[in-house]
Image (cartoon, rainbow, N blue to C red):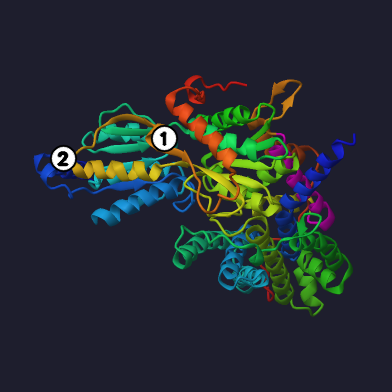
Amino acid sequence: MPVTIGGFVRAILVVGAVSGPAAAAEAADIKPAVVFDLGTKYDKSFNEGVFNGTERFRKEFNVPVAEFEPANETQFEQAHRRFAQRGQDPILAVGFNQASVVDRIAKDFPDTRFSLIDGVSKLPNVQSVLFREQEGSFLVGMLAAMASKTGKVGFVGGMDIPLIRRFACGYGQGVRYADAKAELIQNMTGTTPSAWNDPGRGAELARGQFDRGVDVVFAAAGATGLGVLQAAKDAGKLSIGVDSNQNHLHPGSVLTSMVKRVDVAAFDSFKEARDGTWKGGVSVLGLKDGAIDWALDDNNKALITADMKSRVDAAKADIISGKIKVVDYMEGNSCPP
Amino acid sequence: MAALLPELLSLASGTLRMATPLILCAMGGLFSERSGIVDIGLEGKMLAAAFAAAAAAAVTGSASAGLAAGCGAALLLALVHGFASITHGGNQVVSGVAVNMLASGLTITFGQAWFASGGATPALPASARFMTVVGGHNILVLAALASVPLTWWVIGRTRFGLRLRAVGESPRAVQAAGVSVAGLRYRAVLACGLLTGIAGTYLSLAQSAGFSREMTAGQGYIALAALIFGKWRALPAFGACLLFGFVDVLAIRLQGVAVAGVAVPVQLFQVLPYGLTVILLAGFVGRAVAPKAIGLPFVGGR
């Protein structure tokens, strides 16, 4: 116990020094830290996107960023507590799985600033960043339906949580918007966080869908998605990446990627803390903020016809203007059939 | 009925894909355990082989070099297990657990040191992997299928097999007949290393395109369970592996399927393999009698 209390006092002292009046002038004086989500830092998707953002911050401002890669979900709390005790501030929590932990720790360390991606906490010292994944999923769903020759498209989710159902639901709406007769087959990898890091199972799920006639599959499953993309490449089918731009992984086989700019969210949160403009509260980012988009680059431009591009761009404008309303699964925990 | 045939074929081929690492591991475990050496380290050997194969294939760009490295790594761990439990008469379960922990830690450490991407190896191109040769299956799947009759023949029909079984039942009799107990057991443990090496290589070079940490995900233990299901015999163990593979595929395929208009919860299918295991163990397998001398270190002079 003495260790904890000692660390706690020290944390308050350090944080007090940072957020006191002197800190506003000394902008560089922050000690940022990041606690990644499960599924390894190099998942080429969600975590790696955040990592790219924190790396950019580290290089641009020459500020070291402390990192923690949890091996299982019980380590989240420990990681946050240790960081807070050591005076790290702000602390970036990556992923839905950390929301409840941040809620607890932020209460114990009211002077430490926390940023939470994909989760919500109402505490004043927590900044929650959410994304309207349904909007981007809608667009890639349209592309999937337009690219499919069999009229059957697939979805492979990671852990079966409302957030991933939001991806699936937006995707389904996009598929039907582009082709009312298209059929959607969806699978979730599992119900525990290990579902984010099981490429073998992801590949098997994709193969099962291909056997049933699917020829375009969207993976929203962290590192598990790498197996889905690989299986699509091996079987000569199309796949859709998620979070980071994954088009380069298998050029000519990845149709597009549903890009979620977690790198910008991570970078901005640290930069705001450095500039003294950091504010608590909830922000929700979507298509109109440029935080969500679909990826078009040299690796997939041969797969996207001019007609597909114009239809998707039109739908994108309509979603931004509010003409198309994409239903959010998490609002009513239900999806329109 | 005609519409059902492709569905069944797809199920069968999925079963085979999922069961391949189990079959290879179970056959490897059979050699080891019939000679009296408990092998709880199947998981670790397979994991080390998966890593070594992916690392070698990433560096050389050759799938066969990957297979060689995978088998080499598993053989090395098999020797460690043999040295502790045969030469020094150590506790075989402890040594097996040590092999598992060693593999789990070393693969991530080396992976991070060599490729700096959190213990994973780079994604491999098709030329550095085992790709499809027959009916959607690759050469390692065929190797797994061939390993079953081969194991059955070697254990049941050759002089080496007879001695191997004898050393697992009564090592003293084997010694009295003038045959080296340690020599036989080392050969059995090495055969196990070779087969788990192929299993690991299959995971990283055929099923996936590269190594990711803890990618064996407990399949070594499932193979051990299948071996016990099969009462330490090749054909029944093979059947048990296929059953596990089938239930796994079924759990994947049946997800989101509505039965009589009601959507079945995902969790029900995910619990299926475990539920079935418990039911089968409790009701249908009957008494599984292990080789008599299993787990007992042999000290010749006593």
Q: Quadrant of the N terminus of chain A?
A: top left
Q: Residue at x 77, y 54 (%)?
A: B136
Q: Please identify the quarter of the rendering in which residue B276 is found.
A: top right
Q: Residue at x 68, y 73 (%)?
A: B302
Q: Residue at x 53, y 56 (%)?
A: B213
Residue range corresponding to the magenta coloring: B232-254
Amino acid type of the residue tagged 1 in the rendering: Asp
Amino acid type of the residue tagged 2 in the rendering: Ser
Mark 1 highlights which residue?
A118
Q: Quadrant of the C terminus of chain A?
A: top right
Q: How many marks?
A: 2
Q: Real-space Cα distance between discs 2 and 1?
A: 26 Å
Mark 2 and mark 1 residues within 8 Å of each other at the beta carbon: no
From the image, give the main secondary structure of the stretch colored magenta.
helix
Number of other residues with Cα within 10 Å of mark 1, as a class: few under 14, some 14 to 19, many 20 or more: some
SS label for mark 1: loop
The location of residue A50, given as percent across then percent down, is 39, 47
The location of residue B29, given as percent across then percent down, is 72, 60
Number of other residues with Cα within 10 Å of mark 2, as a class: few under 14, some 14 to 19, many 20 or more: some
Residue B57 or A327: which is nearer the viewer? A327
Residue A39 or B302: which is nearer the viewer? A39
Residue A19 - label: 2
SS label for mark 2: helix
Q: Does residue B247 appear in the picture of this structure?
A: yes
